[in-house]
Amino acid sequence: MLIESLNPATGEIIGQVESTAVNQIGRIVSEARIAQSEWNAMPLNSRGQLLRKFGELLLSRRKIVAELMSRENGKPVVEAYTSEIIPALDFVKYYTGKSRKIVRRRRVKIGIPLLKTKKAFVRYEPLGVVGIISPWNYPLMLPLGQIIPALMAGNSVIFKPSEFTPLVGGLIGDFMWEVGIPKRVFSIVQGGAEVGAALVSSGLDKLFFTGSTVTGRRVSEAAAKTLTPVSLELGSKDAMIVLADADIDSAASGAIWGAFMNAGQTCVSVERCFVDEKIAGQFIEVLRKKTAALRTGAGTESGTDIGAIIHKAQYDIIRRHISDATSKGARIVSGAEYTEEGGRHFVKPTILADVPMDCLLMKEETFGPVLPVVEFKTEREAIELVNASKFGLSASIWTADSKHGLEIACKVRAGAVTVNDVISYYGISDGVVGGVRESGTGRVHGREGLLEMVSPKYYEVERAPRMKKLWWYRYDDALLSFFETATDFLFFKDIFRKAGSLFKLAPKILRIRKS
Ligand code: NAD
């Protein structure tokens, strides 16, 4: 079966790829498993060299990649650089440079004196075959944030791009294979839900899923049947809190960029904006003026700020959320204008004020260029409003007092909280991304992202192999008495009690009989 790739800004077919037959997935996993041991046997530096070459190829073909991403996903070309190519290249640089240090073997420090005859260490070993299922909204940066550390750690990878961005997904494979990464070490399966579901149940060693909470729940249920470990990076309803002392102009610029970039189709988009009532009127007016200057259109056209919506289903959700909010009393400050013709879907950047908390726009992920603004009276109220969501990917606090901003950040339930900026933390390779609650369970990027790709294994050598251990058989009253006193000696802090129990230990040890 062929998958057609459509340009969401024009409705044109820009390419086709062959969908992977579901009955081929078992074979692909078996081949990846065989190839993995050879890949892992390569020195880490050699794997790093190949991935560096991948980075060089991506850099040299950046214009073609940026153009394709804009055509296939709809994003402005400038965003293809800022939120895809630049962070992706930085992931390559980061993981090829830092992996050795992060996964180097760790000596185990033994606390209990009776165990000190052992020498032990922990090695971080590859998981085996990992599956990576990705969404369409960041078709390059998102999967590479997982593919690069997975390969560096010595795993083989089976990657399923979204059925809405199969060409960008295919290009990642072409580049990997061109630099010499074996096809069985990095393979691609193309297709939609059926192919994804088959991959989930194929006996992977771990699955990394990024996508909606609805699909994530399905994936998690299916993976439970084979006890396949899953990392879930899911949807959100990220909040922004604007305190009365914030720089209004800067906060307004951050809010509209945070809400509208990639046409609002970003997991860490600003989807709820809470502003102190003392500055709300002025803040909303600045938002309105700045939004009026934004241009909506094809991402490939120079000067476009907001591109197309990926498909009709997403467009319908956005419209439904806006109309539900306005029917419940929300006021349109700007936007709420739509274009739907010839398979193209655009939503003008929309700002709504006086939005009631019980509407879909404040509760469910909208994933469109919509900024709902709600006023608050006290900081406590603002924190409660933010934490009322079932999601928790990230949040931001805007204030002139960054120390105070961090104090509020501690009270916000989310995987990341930033002070005076939004979204861009996602591109920091050494940072960490992941949600709480219905935003997911896994962590990507940084040290933690690499540690998700390995299995810590414990190794130990007993340096006194002929010595029978005190805790071995036989058990009798002498042994019990020894260990009671040993417990007192090890854990009581009182120095006299410690000294007393040490004094009693010597004769007790002599009474122990070993078989
Ligand atoms: P989606 O859940 O519809 O699809 C994601 C991927 O899952 C696609 O490749 C799809 O083919 C596949 N899939 C669908 N059904 C499947 C099944 N039953 N089993 C296995 N795979 C299946 O999501 P989407 O519309 O592509 O992406 C948008 C969503 O992704 C939003 O909710 C967004 O918030 C989320 N997202 C989260 C993050 C994050 O870091 N937390 C990043 C980007 C996007």
Image: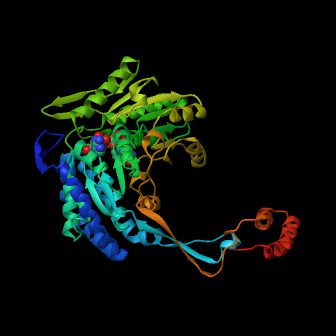
Q: Is residue 107 above or below residue 297?
A: below
Q: Say whether residue 136 is visible.
A: no
Which residue does the image show at 43% across and 42% down from the upper left? 439
List x then y, in percent, for residue 425.
43, 52
Q: Residue furthest front?
A: 515
List x then y, in percent, for residue 301.
18, 45
List x then y, in percent, for residue 402.
57, 48
Which residue does the image show at 76% across and 67% down from the upper left? 479
Marks counted in the figure total 0
Q: Is residue 349 above or below residue 199?
A: above
Which image quadrant is residue 444 in? bottom left
Which image quadrant is residue 270 in? top left
Q: Say whether residue 85 is visible.
A: yes
Which residue does the image show at 51% across and 42% down from the upper left? 398
Q: Quick check: 51 left or right of 363?
A: left
| Ligand 1 located in image quadrant | top left
The coloring applied to the image is rainbow
Name the residue nearer the viewer: 100 or 418.
100
The C terminus, quarter of image: bottom right
Name the residue nearer the viewer: 492 or 320.
492
List x then y, in percent, for residue 185.
26, 65
Which residue does the image show at 74% across and 74% down from the upper left? 513
Name the residue nearer the viewer: 230 or 384.
230
